[in-house]
Image (cartoon, helix red, strand yellow):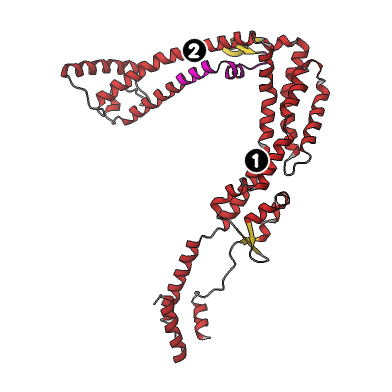
Amino acid sequence: MLIHLQLHKAGIYTPPCSAGFPTAKLPSYTIFWQAFPQLHDTLFTPKSAAYSELTIVKQDVNASISGHPQVLEFISAYNQAFNGFDDHLNSQLIQTWESVKRNQQEAVLSAELFTRLAPIALIDKYQAYQFLNNQWQLISADLEMMQTEGFAATKQVDPNIVIKKKDGKDTEVQDGWKGHILPFDLVQQTYLSDDLQALAAKEARLAEIASTLEEILESLTEEEKEQDTVKESKDGFANTEVGKAAKAFLKEQKDIKAKFADESYEAKIICANKLIDEEKALKKTVKDAAAALHLKTKTTIETLTDEQVNNLLHLKWIAPLTTELAAMPNSVISQLTSQVQALADKYAVTYSQVANEIKTTEQELADIMGELTGNEFDMQGLTELTSLLKGK
């Protein structure tokens, strides 16, 4: 009794507590477990009426959920439910665009959407409808122009009018062209991808040059930054002065028949000058290429075949919707995974943590026992227990 009392007062003796997490945390997942009862049993094991624990290590939560047969079956069933949906939309909206009743068509498509979703659990049907509704606004506006102006409207380009300051006043001016129905960027990505990628590569090189020039500038000493080659603001090179200095350094390098050390001020200025020259030439190339691509896109739209127009309408109207719908089951699974992972992280206690806590507590117990008092029988028991705790 005396020993237990002193251990309790010392704060060393405490009753063991249950591991795992409160089972009460699980009811919020009821909707998931109704859909995936076997997944629940795979993930959790009840330890008592009040506590449960993860059956798997927390690092395996994502793999265990995403690879579970019931989850895979759920995704497969969803995909099967929407099999052919894009073809259905294509038939309803593109192939018969002239006869589409715009004031009724959204309701027809919504009914089809809900019919396909009816047997699928967990999916937010009104979120799916919102995807449809958002896309329908764009489709309806395009259909109105096509039904009013004819199919030729899809191959039409309009002046791109912007507001610019002229003599201190806002003035409307033309800044290139834009598609009447089909966006320039969509046409470029679909039918002018080689030109687009070539332009993007040049723009990427420009960004790389700017970054390298910044690195060279930052590598200069404070004294070097006081030279005429650097702007007074110290935020960039003075290009003209860099050119003059580089020319002089190159002549000096030729005269001494040796290259400057890579980390020398002279070598950095020579390198910066090469980059500045490349940047200047490349900026003009990019500007010319962008202008050429713009005009090529205009011509491409005006000479599209009907089949190409239909393909572009599919990409503009239907593909964004089907992409959003296709992502919905994975979004549901990601939500479940995040919640289970958060639960696992919050209540996780690793074996090494438990082992360390036990070892520390044993040492504390052994140390305090040297201060305990009792009769001869108690002290004999204490000596044996101390030896056991210390591993002797």
The amino acid sitting under disc 2 is Ala
**Which image quarter: residue 326?**
top right
Please indicate whether residue 335 sits to the left or right of residue 102 in the image.
left
Taking depth in this image into account, of 266 and 196 the one nearest to the observer is 196
Please indicate whether residue 296 sits to the left or right of residue 376 in the image.
right
Taking depth in this image into account, of 341 and 208 the one nearest to the observer is 341
Give the residue displayed 56% in from the left and 73% down from the top.
15
Q: Which mark is residue 97?
A: none
Taking depth in this image into account, of 122 and 259 the one nearest to the observer is 122
| Residue that label 2 marks | 289
N-term-proximal mark, 1 vs 2? 2
Residue 199, image x and y in percent? 49, 17
Residue 117, image x and y in percent? 76, 37
Q: Which mark is residue 331?
A: 1
Magenta segment, principal secondary structure?
Answer: helix
Residue 377, image x and y in percent? 46, 90
Q: Are marks 1 and 2 in contact (CB under 8 Å)?
A: no
Give the residue displayed 74% in from the left and 14% down from the top.
145
Callout 2 environment at 10 Å: few (<14), some (14 to 19), or many (20+)? some
- Magenta segment, which residues? 180-202
**Which image quarter: residue 193?**
top right
The amino acid sitting under disc 1 is Ser
Q: How many marks?
A: 2
Residue 124, image x and y in percent? 73, 40
